[in-house]
Image (spheres, rainbow, N blue to C red):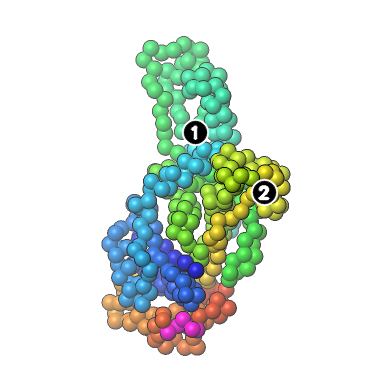
Amino acid sequence: MTRGRFAPSPTGRMHLGNVFCALLSWLSAKSQGGEWVLRIEDLDPQRSRKEYALQLMDDLQWLGLPWDGEPVWQSQRGHIYEEYLRRLTEMGLTYPCHCTRADIMATQAPHETDGRVVYKGTCRPRAIDAIGAIDSIGSIDSVIRTVPATTLPPTVSLSQGDEEQRSGGGMSPHRSPLTITPATTRLIVPDCTIPFTDGHYGRHDINLAEHCGDYIVRRKDGAWAYQLAVVVDDALMGITEIVRGRDLLLSSPQQIHLRELLFFERKTENGTDAGSESRSKIYFDYAEQQGGKDREAGLKRKNNSLTAHHSPLTVNFFHHPLLCNAEGQRLCKRDKSMDLGYLREKGTTAGEIIGLLAHLAGLTDTPAPITPTELLPLFSWDKVPTEDIMLDKQIML
């Protein structure tokens, strides 16, 4: 059975762009006789507010977009994300990074003007070298005596006594302990191509190393990064269909990659799980051998004693065009004339909002008022445009 989801961030009142996404997601799931669940992505403690979450739930009910079951709050699931980050760390696939955004931007080529920021792996070599040295020598003190400063893990900064010892000044009797400084946690990605087919925008082949580089799974302030939380929640909630704006289209290969690391079962001939060590070995051997070729062939060829197969829940992606304001910019929560607070206060009905969005989505010939339930027999992804949609002031509510 299809299980879709709507996953808003409660950082302000929903605007028409958010409702457009919710409507298409609800119609896509319900037209297949499926379920539609609500997940509140309130991981940003600085911007998320419970009152915004309660408002958006009230707005969804008012619009005629009810969800199945109880809402899931990401802020209550940190212990779950912690466990899956631990698994990635045990595979040897994470490392600390101290690079600032300015540092990363300074590494970008002058011609890279499409807005993408690709992490070049600045901290990866020294983190891996230092962690390997600690593992082989057995203690931080041994590393201090034998490993150059540039190879210490980025989370470790040396005290004055440590520096004296490294420079030959001997052990300070009052040496302070090593200081642990905040760092983001990055996930190592292979230099290989991730193929996927979006249900609306078709086939894409994305090389993760070239597209984004090693990406963040936990922020420096301790907050969980979007990619890790979304992948874990979608898998554990049994989500089979993801509908969202096309601005997130190229997040799909990152999430496919991470989902395979965490939920791609690899079993031995006797049916037991191959374990994290084998997963990590297959992952790196595959990346080294394939060099961007088909991933499935690499996994299957690597070791005949291992059988790789997907979780029974296959995720289908459907991305939709964005709603843009008169200046051609994607709607955001700063566009107050487009948010539901303003529209409801001026007396706009739910039917009028749904009717306008259904018309913009190509589902109806006119923007006449209509309910989501009445749209179900009219829904088809074939009708939805692929180009972004400019909101014409003449048909605005």
Q: How far across and how far down the image is residue 382, in percent?
A: 58, 78
Total numbered labels placed on residues in the image: 2
Residue range (magenta): 374-378
Residue depicted at 36% across the width and 73% down the height: 66
Q: Which residue is mark 2?
A: 299
Asked if labels 1 and 2 touch by Cβ distance under 8 angstroms, the answer is no
Q: Is residue 354 magenta?
A: no
Which amino acid type corresponds to the residue marked 1 in the rendered image? Answer: Pro
Residue depicted at 67% across the width and 44% down the height: 305
Drawn side of residue 211 relative to residue 328, left or right: right
Q: Which label's residue is closer to the chain start, 2 or 1?
A: 1
In this view, the residue in front, 273 or 383, is 273
Tag of residue 154? 1
- For the question of whether residue 65 can be seen, the reply is yes
The quadrant where residue 204 appears: bottom right
Q: How far across and how far down the image is residue 172, in percent?
A: 41, 13
